[in-house]
């Protein structure tokens, strides 16, 4: 737990950034750099063409007055170019200085430092509500600026002073962990808990604690995305730069086509459509495990098999769209059709022989990742043939470097897979969080911002929460919730 003065001390690293943002907003700086780039290009083009305006085709195309003006003022145009160039390069140097401080890591996040330096010493609530973040939060709650001004000007309101608040790390009273960071939610919560007038003000607008902090998280997530977009020279961004060449060689893969199908032929891949990016974060996490861990085999553990396969399909989309890391650019995901394999090979020896041939062909081709969509189901089917699938796979994994992605539901994993310790050691496990209410709201928030961008409307937070509550326990909750959102705001 930190006092306000301690937070201000930790925020000192961000002071130059806060000062620059007060002088000129980030969005304005981006627009100015783009405008300067266009002007610089235009002046450069004129500077190149000016010496030839009295000869050749330019003397015919251009009016005589324009051609004479450009030719006679050639040195002035060159001077203008270098003036604009100096301003343009200084704009980028200015931004480099800004980012060098903006991306620093300390015990508080940048958004907190912004609020701290812009706060009113004797009224922290007013400082928050007048800030850009506070205005955004209240806008998402559907509260107008006039009502906010009336609330701030209310003399009967008890004002929260700086020395009155203590900020906890993520709501936990543990001041000893130096790795923890005070984020926007933590700072605003310390004000909200202390300010009973603010709580009453929100209650009068039929807004709950969850509504308020849902909007705070929305603002925080946007800030995280902006920060991530500015971190270009990170390993995660650099390894996604496309390589010059790809491995397009093909070999005999008749067994793969007989018992497997490519991921883009899979129903989960086809059902993603334009919404494939919803599981992008989970697919990238799985991709990182395939790169970084000691095993190149992943076991996805999910509440539903369909969720796991949607994540695998998203990874396939990333490969198809050239958004994966260079290591997987030429990889092909083949999904094993276990039912067909078992139907065609009803005895244990035949099944094992055919499966080993599949693995051998995939290994020899060297650009294939084999996907087993429901591992516990195959294990149970093998048991009917008196075939120990776990033992067979364990033997195969020891003798090949073919990457495997397997999927299991949480309950089936604990019953069927977890007891086999040696087998588990050959996989890096990735447990997918359940699609809960918060996850669904986050997807709706992203979609809402797209609708706003095209339809020029404002979508507040409470309706998104209501849609999430309506569909969270249903099958295909994401798609149903998105359909409802578009039905309400695009009708």
Image (cartoon, helix red, strand yellow):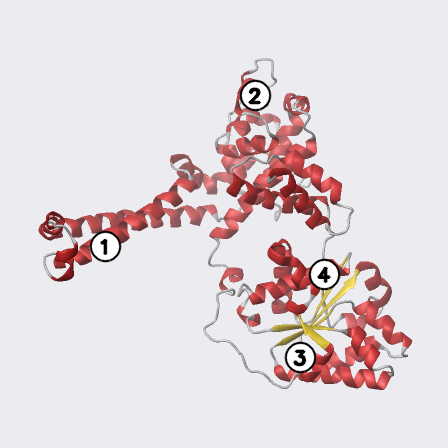
Res. 463 in view: yes
Identity of the residue drawn at 58% across and 20% down: 159
N-term-proximal mark, 4 vs 1: 1
**What quarter of the picture does the N terminus occupy?**
top right
Name the spot of residue 172 as percent of width and height, x first: 69, 40
- The residue to which callout 3 is attached is 401
The kind of secondary structure element at disc 4 is helix
- The residue to which callout 2 is attached is 147
Give residue 44's mark.
1
Find out whether the residues at labels 4 and 1 contact each other: C-beta distance under 8 Å.
no
C-alpha span from label 3 to label 1: 55 Å
Local packing at callout 1 (Cα closer than 10 Å; few below 14, some 14-19, many 20+) is some
The kind of secondary structure element at disc 2 is helix
Q: Is residue 353 above or below residue 443?
A: below
Residue 469 falls left or right of residue 68:
right
C-alpha span from label 2 to label 3: 64 Å
C-alpha span from label 4 to label 2: 46 Å
**In the current view of this chain or complex, which residue is farthest to the top?**
156
């Amino acid at each position: 737990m930190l006092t306000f003065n301690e937070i201000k001390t930790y925020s000192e690293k961000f002071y130059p950034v806060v000062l620059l943002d007060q002088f000129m907003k980030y969005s304005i700086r981006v627009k100015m750099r783009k405008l300067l780039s266009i002007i610089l290009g235009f002046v450069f083009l004129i500077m190149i063409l000016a010496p030839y305006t009295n000869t050749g085709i330019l003397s015919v195309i251009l009016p005589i007055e324009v051609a004479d003006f450009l030719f006679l003022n050639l040195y002035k145009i060159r001077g203008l170019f270098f003036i604009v160039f100096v301003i343009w390069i200084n704009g980028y140097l200015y931004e480099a200085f800004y980012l060098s401080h903006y991306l620093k890591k300390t015990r508080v996040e940048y958004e907190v430092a912004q609020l701290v330096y812009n706060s009113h010493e004797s009224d922290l609530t007013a400082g928050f509500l007048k800030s850009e973040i506070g205005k955004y939060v209240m806008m998402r709650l559907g509260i107008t600026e006039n009502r906010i001004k009336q609330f701030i000007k209310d003399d009967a309101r008890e004002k929260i002073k700086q020395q009155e608040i203590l900020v906890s790390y993520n709501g936990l009273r543990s001041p000893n962990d130096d790795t923890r960071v005070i984020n926007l939610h933590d700072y605003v919560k310390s004000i909200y808990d202390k300010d009973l007038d603010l709580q009453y003000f929100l209650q009068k607008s039929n807004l709950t604690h969850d509504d308020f902090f849902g909007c705070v998280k929305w603002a925080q997530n946007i800030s995280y995305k902006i920060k991530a977009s500015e971190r270009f020279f990170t390993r995660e961004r650099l390894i996604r730069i496309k390589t010059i060449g790809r491995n397009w060689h093909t070999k005999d893969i008749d067994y793969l086509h007989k018992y497997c199908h490519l991921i883009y032929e899979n129903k989960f891949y086809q059902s993603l459509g334009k919404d494939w990016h919803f599981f992008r974060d989970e697919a990238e996490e799985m991709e990182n495990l395939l790169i970084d861990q000691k095993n190149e085999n992943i076991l996805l553990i999910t509440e539903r098999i369909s969720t796991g396969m949607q994540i695998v399909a998203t990874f396939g989309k990333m490969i198809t769209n050239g958004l994966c890391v260079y290591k997987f650019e030429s990889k092909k995901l083949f999904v094993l059709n276990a039912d067909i394999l078992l139907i065609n090979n009803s005895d244990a020896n035949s099944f094992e022989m055919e499966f080993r041939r599949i693995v051998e062909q995939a290994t020899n081709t060297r650009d294939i990742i084999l996907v087993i969509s429901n591992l516990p189901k195959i294990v149970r089917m093998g048991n009917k043939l008196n075939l120990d699938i776990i033992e067979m796979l364990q033997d195969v994994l020891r003798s090949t470097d073919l990457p495997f992605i397997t999927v299991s539901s949480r309950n089936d994993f604990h019953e069927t897979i977890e007891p086999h310790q040696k087998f588990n050691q050959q996989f890096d496990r990735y447990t997918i969080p359940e699609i809960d209410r918060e996850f669904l709201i986050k997807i709706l928030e992203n979609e809402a911002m797209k609708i706003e961008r095209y339809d020029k409307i404002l979508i507040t937070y409470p309706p998104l929460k209501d849609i999430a509550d309506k569909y969270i326990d249903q099958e295909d909750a994401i798609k149903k919730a998105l359909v409802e959102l578009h039905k309400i705001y695009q009708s």
